Image (tube, helix red, strand yellow):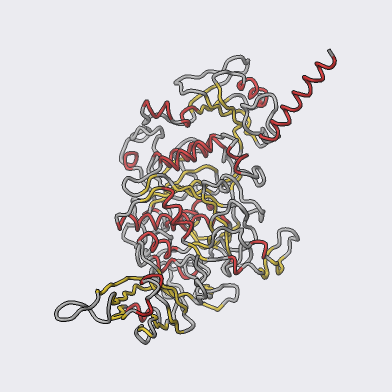
Amino acid sequence: MRKLALLILTIIVTACSQYYEDVDNTIPAYDNKIINSKDNAVSGSLLVKLKAYTTEYQVEATDVEIASSPLFPTNNASEEELHSEAIYRWWILTFDENSDVEALAGIIAKDSRVEYVEYNSQMECIGSDSEVANIDVVTTRSSGKKELPFNDPLLAEQWHYCNDGYTYNGDDASLDTNHIEGADINLFSAWKYSTGDPRIVVAVLDGGVQYNHEDLAANMWVNEKEFTGTQGEDDDNNGFVDDIYGYNFCDNNAEITFDDHGTHVAGTIAAVNGNGIGVAGVAGGSGNGDGCRIMTCQIYDEDGNSAKTENIARAIKYAADNGAVIMNNSWAYSKGSYVSDEKFAKNYSVLIDAINYFEREASYNGLITGGIAIFAAGNDGYGTPSYPGAYYNNICVTSFAPNFTGSSFSNYGAGANICAPGGEIGAWYDKICSTSTNNRYEYMYGTSMAAPHVAGCAALALSYALELGKSFTREEFKSILLTSVHDIDQYQTERQGAFNHVTGEYETVNIEYLKGKLGAGYIDAHLLLMQIEGTPFIFCSSSKEDLISLDAYFGDGSEKLTYTSVEISDTDMNELGITTKPSFENGKLKIHCTKRGAARIKVTAIIGGNSVGGGDNMGGMEVTREFELVVRHSAAGNGGWL
């Protein structure tokens, strides 16, 4: 009998051991339906996923009074969707905050109707430090050497769009060794082709965006049925009353409470361009009402509180159902909560169901099938990006400073996909300039500042695709987005005057450990638009005369061809500092640019002879190829492009 008991105990221990290998060991062992830890759980509520859709669900076998309701509105869902979409099987249970939430989770998990029980966790806001722009933004400000495409007074100070190596402060422009020419998203060249399109909507899951900000109001998403409808009624039957500019998921009403962080993020994506006020947005239009639109999905208040699982999940589905095709996220599980995609996927959280829903259902007919979810990597200076951003199916954004070095605060490592300007700790002019509440402007730093650069570039690219009549699957567009980058690893040698999270001091830090860990490279908006268009690039330097082989475009025998013309406009020649028209020497394109920028160039060659055929002679055929000539400060090998 003793041997039998010992055998049973061994089997139990072995089974438990196997269980703890497969599941986070903070999960209560008594029932594997409970999918997360009670750590950081919100009192007075639980989330439950049922095995099948139902219109009614009441908790039994407990003396605690529990109210239950579907987590997501079902107003506009078809009968087929209600039964096929996993998201409609989630319910939220509410009860007295003094109740034992762990004991209730155990009781509910024993219900045969229940598939999973999830603690309603408090998420971490990926916050930022800031400095108020103490300036009169109404006056015209100096642009120094920089030629500005719009009249927004603070545009010169947005180094993250076009970095010329100078810092700008009012009427003063000075060369700054910590600002390196080209450490930006190359936005001015991209703006030649697209500045945005109001049909592209970006959902900002953050603090509430000041929708009436002088530099944002014209580019806010507006729910027209609610705007022109009856106050207090759900005029569009989407389950949310009076949601004109978005929704406050913290307080479960349409009264958006303005937040500096969310408003700053929104400004980077689509502050109004060309209005003579404040800053410019990546996809903010040309000043003619043609910027991309911002939908505010408030998931936490101005103090960074209330970012609960329930709020975020509902906000994600709301964005998908109401027209957003891009979602910018500045929230995450706390650092180290998950260390692998497998463990994250096994969570089966409502957030996974919500994100999957967005990435599948948030689409624009004829343009893209599926939504693009973009996440900040986190500001812990940690060797693992925060989840959900780190999950392989999401776009995770790290941050770099105005000298190309990875920002000292940025998380990095496996799971990071792409890098964008997020600024640096220290001087205000090293931070990101954008909108803030009360019609102000602030300089902030953080991966929360980097992510909206990528979201804005994605919005700009989809705007251009609309203009060109192009269409993409979600995976096709993601591939284009993540390959429109330049090599950033070459700059990860040392960071001077940087804040060291370990020592707490400002010092010179060896940052070679960042190589290969900031993502594929740093994003280039111009390159992205050219990939959308399908136009190849010719790269050259602004520091020397270039002889460029065209083998990649006319075949390996390009140097033996007869070239009949090179076309480039006088305006483009002047913009690139070209004083002698491009020509051919020994079968290579000879060109000398002295200014950074981009221009369109056409090259015509004869294929099949030294002269064009026809008439009395035999000859070849003229073939013309169009290229985008891209000039950076230096270009060696592949020019730093990937």
Q: Nearer the viewer, residue 404 or 298?
A: 404
Q: Which quadrant of the view contains residue 466?
A: bottom left
Residue 583 horizontal side relative to residue 379, left or right: left
**x, y percentage for residue 236?**
34, 35
The residue lying at 32 percent from left, 45 percent from top is 365
Q: Is residue 568 above or below residue 520?
A: below
Residue found at x 28% / y 72%: 623
Above/below status of 117 relative to 406: above
- Residue 310 visible in rendering: yes
Q: Quadrant of the N terminus?
A: top right
Q: Nearer the viewer, residue 274 or 290?
A: 290
* Image location (x, y in percent) of residue 432: 53, 62
Residue 462, position as x, y percentages in the image: 37, 54
Drawn side of residue 121 relative to residue 140, left or right: right
Q: Residue furthest bottom?
A: 580
Q: Residue at x 61, y 45 (%)?
A: 124
Seen at 40% across and 40% down, the residue is: 361
Percent coordinates x, y for residue 309 in the rendering: 56, 37
377 horizontally vs 146: left or right: right
Question: Dividing the picture into quarters, in which one does residue 149 lie?
Answer: bottom left
| Residue that sits furthest to the left in the current view | 615
Residue 439 sits above or below residue 487 on the image = above
Answer above or below: position of 348 versus 590: above
Which residue is at the far right?
Answer: 2
The answer to whether residue 251 shows anywhere in this view is no
